[in-house]
Image (cartoon, helix red, strand yellow):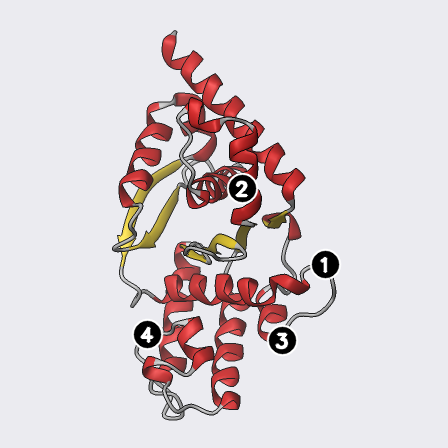
Amino acid sequence: HLDDSGTHACSPLAIVGGVILSEQGSVDLQKAWCNTLTKSEYGVEVFHGADCDAGRGEFDGWARERSHKLSLELANIVSSHAADIIVYGIKPEDFHTIWEELSLRKNGIKNDVYRILLQLCWHKLGVFAKELPTDDTLKIFVEKGNKRASFINDLYLRVNDDRQASDILNIKQIAFVGKECPPLQAADLLVHEIYKYHPNWDTDVMGDVLRELTKNRNWETIKLFDVNGVRQVMLELQKRDRDFIKRKAK
């Protein structure tokens, strides 16, 4: 289940990330998540990280301690039931600089950092898929109403039209689900907390909610790129596109 944060205009950091769940893990997370939200002390239908922090919507009038307690309980549910987490972040300013530097417009690569982040997530999911039994497949869920839905569908079709990429990624389904889906709310919590604490990413300063979310996780699946990292990423994606075109031409 993938969500994004900071992909709006003028954001200092754009993030795409989410939670990786087994089928049973998804069932267990949903049950625990719903039981927590419906506790008498909370009484929430749908969790939104930004709303919870800002005291908006269902969280209007909440004391900070109450909001924090709920977020921490939900973070514990994620750390207990998710097989792994995945997060990629790029500063839009760095992305646009490299996009111009490498003249990516000529190669048909759009000036849209979300598209790059999504492809990075999919590629890393391919690495995760190699660890799965041969009869297991990945299903990717994103939020219904995503304004880049056509790109997401096109990317899925492109991957499955390319035997080499399809064998690597092993993705068999893309689904668009509403925010009432608890695993998508879990992804929302994750990317919101990463976004909130990204200025301190090179230090040990992070809130206990984020610390709980990332507890015992593989930090190779959590990556915030500097400008040199963005350049390397873009060059690698260019190479993959060229290789894809060559395979299709055969």
Residue 243 versus residue 14 in the image, above or below: above
Kind of element beneath mark 4: loop
Determine the CA span between mark 4 and mark 3: 22 Å
State the CA–CA distance, disc 1 to disc 2. Answer: 20 Å
* Apparent side of residue 148 relative to residue 88 in the rendered image (left or right): left
Front residue of this view, candidates 235 and 26: 235
Task: Say the numbered circle drawn on residue 46.
Answer: 4
Q: Position of residue 3 (x, y in %)?
A: 41, 56
Mark 2 is surrounded, within 10 Å at the Cα level, by few (under 14), some (14 to 19) or many (20 or more) other residues, namely many
- Residue farthest to the top? 250
Foreground: disc 1 or disc 2: 2
Among numbered discs 4 and 2, the one appearing first in the sequence:
4
Q: Position of residue 29 (x, y in %)?
A: 42, 67
Closer to the chain start, of discs 3 and 1, is: 1
The three-letter amino acid code for the residue at tag 2 is Phe
Disc 2 secondary structure class: helix
Left or right: 140, with 221 as reference point: left
> Of residues 9 and 64, which is closer to you in this image?
9
Helix, strand or loop under label 3: helix
Q: CA distance from mark 2 to mark 3?
A: 30 Å
Task: Give the farthest residue toward the right.
Answer: 203
- The residues bearing labels 3 and 1 have C-alpha atoms spaced at a distance of 16 Å
* Towards the viewer: 7 or 41: 7
Q: Amino acid at mark 3?
A: Asp
Quarter of the image where the N terminus is located: bottom left
Give the mark, 4 or 3, whose residue is nearer the N terminus: 4
Give neighbour class at mark 4: few <14, some 14-19, many 20+ (Cα, 10 Å).
some
- Residue at label 1? 202
Q: Residue at x 39, y 63 (%)?
A: 183
- Residue labelled with disc 3: 208
Residue 227 location, quadrant: top right
Look at 33% across and 24% down and name the residue there: 161
